[in-house]
């Protein structure tokens, strides 16, 4: 049985089967580019951007809060200082009145002349002189309105007056709960005093005291209480209807006679300015936009990469398709099956080059002719591609025609040389053509620039020396045949240079390697397979064809 | 001088000088294979196109040449009466000898 086969180089990977977006296995149809609404990495970028933005915004907010608190505390302290500065205005006239009362033994005319102007409303509505010995707690002199104190129970009056004598400061009497809403102030010169000077000031009925718009405190609401508690019963004045402030507040207490004034403040607007207040929102808004833009940019880049990967995959698929087309064409140009001859075993191998995209120009042929003779050919058209393959096909069929006409190998080569021309066709071809003479058990060989064949017998492997003429396609060539006797147990190997040539290596080295590898007793098929395995490196550049002939005895 | 690189990555530089006898000398430096043979051929055709009847091809720095390279040289030198190959490497010399081309592309002795 004559064997003809196309051996594909093993281990060449085909593109792995892919699945399209719908998950169905890729079939005959074109694969579609997978589409996704959003890629995970874009979402992650967005979430990270938002997280960073939120952190910055919260930090800005916290800084703003701290700043507002600090400013408010400063303003409350300032307000406390202003209040403190106002208190001597009350104390000074009272102490003058007390000294005068002691010196004049509470002379009404003198007292009136000094104190009456002060009891006309500002700072007081009522000024009176009381005996320090409070056995009879009634005023000795009254300027202005009758004092509210006089309407109090006697025990309370006694206690208050006794209390004021022992103080070195003004004693404050909280009359805010009374209908007229007054504060009373008592002062005496000391424990030895005979008189106590007492004054009352009137406060607005509605507890409201507006703040001038150009005042230093126009941006604040305040409430001032007598004592230490925020008790509305002791509310002295406020800028608001409802003095129960919510939100940011700060308070301060200043000494006020023998009691204290408590001031509570809340800002009407941002003390540090509106820009600072809006900063967290600005950061939040701008940061969110940046996060969104970054996410969109990421998405775009990811899509581009996905697209590039898709194109690369598609290229790989087209490449493999193209290679398969080239191999199919190559296959169709080589003999499908070799003829059978008695006493002769034939085997061929063909391996496309590593890239395999372009069709190669290597070929082989075996033709039975009259008289039981056999014409055999191995050839190699320079270059690659469709033109090289066309030249190869025309040469192959021309040789078949000449062979059938009865031409000998040298004549065949001479005729071939007229067929193609390097200048016109752009290619030349090396051709080794031979005839097996069945009757004489010899063969003749004619060579147009082709590597010499290897003859193997029981004594070893030797290259057959031929007369090498120029390749077909180069004008001016002459060809002569050599005759070679066929020894017993002979095997003749013909091949193209792809089998032994390596880039940058002297062809003699490759040929020696081939001769070395061709020894040993084995079947013809094993011999050819072994040579391909040993001689052609994986990813070898050139096409390789081998024709093996073995004579059975 | 022309730097020619084909898709296959083979690099070849072509330089042109005139030798003492007045013949144009082209020197091929690098490698020639199917990927750059065409481009080098066009470069050499410029030299030959001047109507010279002698051409020296200096291959002393050519490391490799495949059959496409040989085909290119054969095509270029058609019509040039006296072509000489100068100083080919052993590899290139053997390729020329094995393919029976040492008559058409004679190597300078």
Image (cartoon, rainbow, N blue to C red):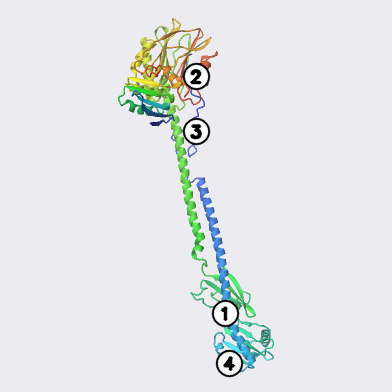
Q: Earlier in the sequence, mark 2 or mark 1?
A: 1
Which residue is most to the top? Answer: A439
Q: How crowded is mark 1: few (under 14 residues within 10 Å), some or many (20 or more)?
A: few
Left or right of A93? Residue B31 is: left
- Select label 3 or label 2 by which is in front: 2
Instruction: Indicate the position of residue A139 as horizontal and vertical percent values.
Output: 63, 91
Determine the secondary structure under disc 1: helix
**The disc label shown at residue A112, or none:** 4
Judging by the rendered image, the residue that carries numbered circle 3 is A17
Label 2: element kind: helix
Picture coordinates of residue A142, whole percent (x, y): 60, 91
Vertical placement of A137 versus A534: above or below? below
C-alpha span from label 2 to label 1: 117 Å
Image position, residue A88 (x, y; %): 59, 81
Looking at the image, is mark 1 or mark 4 earlier in the sequence? Answer: 1
* Residue A86 numbered tag: 1
- Sequence-first disc among 3 and 2: 3
Q: Would you say A164 lies left or right of B75 here? A: right
Q: Which residue is drawn at 48% across and 49% down?
A: A294
Q: Are marks 4 and 3 on the same chain?
A: yes
What is the C-alpha distance between the residues marked 2 and 4? Answer: 141 Å
Chain of the residue where label 1 is placed in the rendered structure: A
Q: Earlier in the sequence, mark 2 or mark 4?
A: 4
Q: Secondary structure beneath disc 4? A: helix
Q: Can residue A144 be seen in this view?
A: no
Identify the chain of the residue marked 3, using the numbered disc in the image: A
The residue carrying mark 2 is A509
Q: Are marks 2 and 4 on the same chain?
A: yes
Work out whether mark 4 precedes mark 3 in sequence or the reverse, and give the earlier one.
Answer: 3
Q: Nearer the viewer, mark 2 or mark 1?
A: 2
Q: Is residue A91 above or below residue A46?
A: below
3D distance between C-alphas at marks 4 and 3: 116 Å
């Amino acid at each position: 049985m004559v064997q003809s086969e196309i051996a594909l180089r093993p281990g060449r990977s085909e593109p792995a089967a892919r699945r399209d977006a719908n998950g169905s296995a890729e079939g005959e149809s074109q694969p579609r580019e997978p589409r996704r609404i959003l890629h995970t990495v874009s979402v992650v970028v967005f979430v990270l951007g938002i997280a960073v933005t939120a952190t910055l915004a919260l930090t800005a907010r916290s800084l703003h809060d701290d700043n507002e608190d600090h400013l408010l505390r400063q303003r409350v302290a300032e307000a406390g200082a202003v209040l403190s500065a106002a208190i001597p205005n009350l104390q000074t006239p009272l102490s003058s009145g007390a000294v005068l009362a002691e010196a004049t033994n509470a002379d009404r005319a003198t007292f009136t002349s000094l104190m009456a102007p002060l009891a006309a409303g500002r700072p007081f509505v009522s000024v009176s002189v009381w005996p320090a010995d409070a056995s009879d707690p009634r005023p000795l002199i009254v300027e202005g309105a009758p004092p509210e104190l006089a309407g109090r129970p006697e025990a309370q009056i006694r206690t208050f007056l006794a209390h004021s004598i022992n103080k070195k400061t003004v004693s404050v009497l909280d009359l805010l709960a009374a209908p007229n809403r007054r504060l009373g102030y008592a002062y005496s010169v000391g424990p030895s005093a005979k008189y106590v000077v007492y004054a009352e000031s009137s406060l607005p009925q509605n507890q409201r005291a507006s703040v001038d718009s150009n005042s230093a405190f126009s941006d604040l609401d305040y409430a001032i209480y007598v004592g230490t508690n925020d008790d509305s019963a002791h509310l002295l004045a406020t800028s608001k209807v409802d003095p129960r402030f919510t939100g940011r507040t700060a308070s301060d207490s200043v000494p006020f006679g023998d009691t204290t004034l408590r001031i509570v403040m809340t800002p009407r607007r941002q003390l540090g300015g509106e820009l600072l207040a809006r900063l967290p929102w600005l950061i939040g808004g701008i940061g969110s936009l940046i996060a969104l833009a970054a996410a969109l940019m990421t998405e775009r880049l990811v899509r581009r990469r996905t697209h590039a990967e898709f194109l690369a995959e598609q290229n790989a698929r087209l490449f493999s398709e193209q290679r398969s087309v080239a191999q199919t064409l190559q296959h169709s140009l080589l003999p499908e099956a070799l003829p059978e001859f008695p006493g002769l075993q034939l085997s061929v191998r063909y391996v496309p080059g590593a890239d395999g995209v372009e069709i190669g120009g290597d070929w082989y042929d075996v033709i039975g002719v009259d008289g039981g003779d056999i014409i055999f050919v191995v050839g190699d058209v320079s270059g690659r591609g469709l033109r090289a393959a066309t030249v190869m096909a025309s040469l192959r069929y021309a040789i078949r025609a000449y062979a059938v006409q009865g031409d000998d190998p040298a004549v065949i080569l001479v005729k071939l040389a007229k067929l193609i021309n390097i200048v016109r066709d752009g290619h030349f071809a090396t051709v080794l053509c031979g005839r097996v003479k069945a009757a004489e058990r010899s063969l003749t060989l004619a060579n147009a620039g082709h590597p010499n064949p290897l003859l193997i017998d029981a004594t070893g492997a030797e290259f057959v020396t031929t007369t090498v003429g120029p390749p077909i396609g180069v004008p001016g060539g002459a060809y002569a045949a050599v005759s070679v006797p066929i020894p017993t147990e002979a095997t003749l190997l013909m091949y193209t240079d792809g089998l032994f040539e390596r880039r940058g290596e002297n062809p003699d080295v490759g040929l020696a390697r081939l001769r070395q590898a061709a020894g040993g007793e084995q079947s013809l098929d094993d011999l050819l397979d072994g040579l391909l395995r040993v001689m052609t490196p994986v990813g070898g550049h050139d096409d390789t064809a081998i024709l093996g002939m073995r004579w059975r005895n | 001088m022309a730097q020619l690189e084909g898709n296959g990555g083979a690099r070849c530089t072509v330089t042109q000088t005139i030798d003492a006898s007045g013949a144009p000398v082209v020197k091929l430096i690098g490698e020639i294979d199917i990927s750059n043979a065409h481009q080098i051929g066009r470069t050499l055709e410029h030299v030959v196109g001047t109507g010279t009847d002698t051409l020296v091809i200096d291959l002393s720095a050519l490391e490799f040449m495949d059959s496409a390279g040989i085909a290119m040289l054969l095509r270029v030198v058609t019509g040039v009466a006296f072509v000489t190959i100068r100083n080919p490497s052993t590899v290139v010399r053997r390729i020329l000898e094995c393919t029976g081309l040492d008559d058409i592309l004679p190597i300078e002795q």
